[in-house]
Amino acid sequence: MTRSYSELIKIPSFEERFRYLQLNGYVGDATFGSHRHLNQTLYRNPEWRSVRNKVILRDNGCDLAHPDFEIQGQAAYVHHINPITVEDILAKRSIVFDLDNLITVSFQTHQAIHYGTEDLLPKLPIERKPNDTCPWR
């Protein structure tokens, strides 16, 4: 299944956006392992840094580009919506730098997309109401 930013951005809730992206433990196998150095080279590349900045600006520094989840006090990550491969990097395929294949995420959300469940996702603060902690009222 090919996913895209233009489709993701139409999804209203943060949790639904997460489910759209969730990989259920799958990581682009060919990108990791003995080829990890290619990722490191890519992410230090000036072209990548420029695209990364464009993505973060486009998403207003918000986790999954959701306005209620501004990333504060930590680095913003840029996640490939469709995982890339060693061949994609070596051939400099457009999928690597395509803005429609990139989304801003927090570290927690990135970990949850790849390895976890909604339990790892950041949560909005609980909206408090008068006497909500007082059981006899």
Image: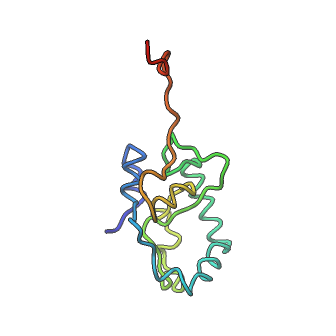
The chosen color scheme is: rainbow
Residue 39's image quarter? Answer: bottom right
Q: Relative to 102, does residue 137 appear above or below in the rendering? A: above
> Tag count in the figure?
0
Q: Nearer the viewer, residue 43 or 99?
A: 43
Percent across and percent down for residue 82 are 42, 69
* Residue displayed at 57% across by 44% down: 70
Instruction: Look at the image and tell me in which quarter the N terminus lies.
Output: bottom left
Percent across and percent down for residue 129 are 48, 20
* Residue displayed at 43% across by 13% down: 136
Residue farthest toward the left in the current orientation of the protein: 1
Q: Relative to 53, does residue 9 appear above or below in the rendering? A: above
Percent across and percent down for residue 56 are 59, 55
- Image position of 84 (left or right of 54): left
Percent across and percent down for residue 26 are 41, 71
Q: Relative to 10, does residue 43 appear above or below in the rendering? A: below
Q: Relative to 41, does residue 75 appear above or below in the rendering? A: above
